[in-house]
Amino acid sequence: AQSVTQPDIHITVSEGASLELRCNYSYGATPYLFWYVQSPGQGLQLLLKYFSGDTLVQGIKGFEAEFKRSQSSFNLRKPSVHWSDAAEYFCAVGPYSGGGADGLTFGKGTHLIIQP
Amino acid sequence: DVKVTQSSRYLVKRTGEKVFLECVQDMDHENMFWYRQDPGLGLRLIYFSYDVKMKEKGDIPEGYSVSREKKERFSLILESASTNQTSMYLCASSSKGDSYSNQPQHFGDGTRLSIL
C-alpha cells in the first residue's frame, strides 16, 4: 500500500529565511506527487504537482519541489519565507496512470511557524 | 477557478441522528471525494465517486455512506452519528484526465462537525 511520511510535525523558520519541508513516499510504481497548503479554517490549496518530466517543479507563491526517485522523496522548498506562509502543509501521493480510481494518500502534515 | 462548495462550515448534531453533508462543484468534474481530517492523522479518504451513481470505499468507510445522483453533487451521510465522528470533513473534486486520479484535487473549505 502506498504511504507518505512527513517527518517534521512542526517547523519554525524566521521570516526571510529559506525553507525545506520533507516528504518521503512509498509506492510501487512512478507516483503522482502533490503539495497542498491549508490556512487556518480553510480547505486545501494546491501548491504544485509532479506527474512526469522535469524533476524540479515550480508552484505558486514561490514554492518549488524536487522529485528524487532514488530517495523516494519530494521535498518542498522556498528561498525566502513570508509571514503569510504560516500554515499546514501536506504532501500527497496518487497512483500511476491506469492504477484505478483512488483518492490521494496524504501525509500527516507539517505545521509551519514563521518567527518575526 | 474551480469552486467546490460545502453547504455548512459548522454543524452540531446529536448522537444517533442521521447527518447529511453536502458538496457541490461547478467544473463538471467526474471524480468527487470525501475526506475527514483529524489532528495528528492528516486526511483520510472515506468514499469517492468517479461517475454519477458510482461509489467506492476509501480507507475508513465504516459508519458512512454516500450519494451521487447528479454529477455536480456528492453527499456524505452519517447513518447514526457517533461522538467519534466529530471531525473536519473535506470534499474534493477532480477531472478524469488520463486516469481516474492523476489530476489535482480541488478542495472545499470544509465542514467542522461536532457530535454531542
Image (cartoon, helix red, strand yellow):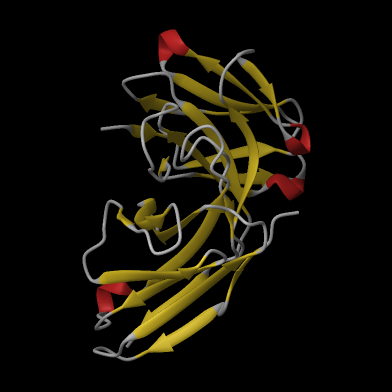
Residue B42 image position (x, y, % from top left): 40, 51
Q: Is residue A73 left or right of residue B27?
A: left
Which residue is nearer to you in this view: B91 or B68?
B68
Q: Is residue B17 above or below residue B101?
A: below
A60 over B62 or under it: above or below: above
Left/right placement of residue A14 relative to residue B6 reads: right
* In this rendering, position of residue A95 left or right of residue A21: left
Q: Is B82 placed above or below A8 here? A: below
Whole-percent x and y of residue B1?
A: 76, 54
User: Based on the displayed image, in which of its 4 quarters is residue B89 positioned?
Assistant: bottom left
Residue at the left extreme of this rendering: B62
Circle count: 0
Residue B27 position in % (x across, y down): 67, 57
Q: Nearer the viewer, residue A4 or A7?
A: A4
On-image quarter of the N terminus of chain A: top left
Q: Quadrant of the C terminus of chain A?
A: top right
State which quadrant residue B97 falls in.
top right
Foreground residue among A2 and A52: A52
Residue drawn where x is 35% and y is 76% of the image: B77
Q: Say which residue appears at 77% left-offset and 32% top-offset.
A: A62
